[in-house]
Amino acid sequence: MTEKWDVLGHELVPDHKVLSKEETKELLKRFKIGAFQMPRIRSNDPAAMACGAKPGDIVKITRKSPTAGKVLAYRYVIEG
């Protein structure tokens, strides 16, 4: 029997969250960019799969930083 491992529960994996359509629209408007101009993450990435990201979604990644406290990064999900 294979046991599932929670990728997002590991202390070294930052928090991943799929943005809603409204949050995505606001983010792209704020930065004045198109989704295709963002850094990418593949849909078969373990963290992307764990948070339920599908191609076309935008994932918000919240990392802990010793100097800045927390750092936000965004990734556009592509097929993979």
Image (cartoon, rainbow, N blue to C red):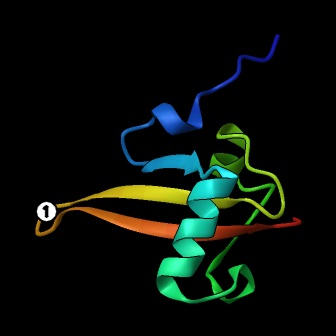
Residue at figure coordinates x 81%, y 64% from the top left: 56
Which of these two is toward me, 77 or 34? 34
| Residue beneath disc 1 | 66
Instruction: Judge whether 68 appears above or below 16 on screen.
Output: below
Quarter of the image where the C terminus is located: bottom right
Q: Secondary structure at mark 1?
A: loop
Residue at the top extreme, as displayed: 1
Q: Is residue 8 left or right of residue 41?
A: left
Instruction: Judge whether 29 appears above or below 21 on screen.
Output: below
Which of these two is toward me, 17 or 63? 17
Quarter of the image where the N terminus is located: top right
Percent x, y of residue 59: 60, 58
Percent x, y of residue 17: 55, 47
Residue at figure coordinates x 74%, y 59% from the top left: 57
Amino acid at pointer 1: Pro
Q: What is the quadrant of residue 25 in the picture? A: bottom right
Q: Is residue 45 left or right of residue 24?
A: right
Which of these two is toward me, 3 or 24? 24
Residue at figure coordinates x 62%, y 63% from the top left: 24
Instruction: Judge whether 48 appears above or below 65 on screen.
Output: above
Residue at figure coordinates x 38%, y 65% from the top left: 72
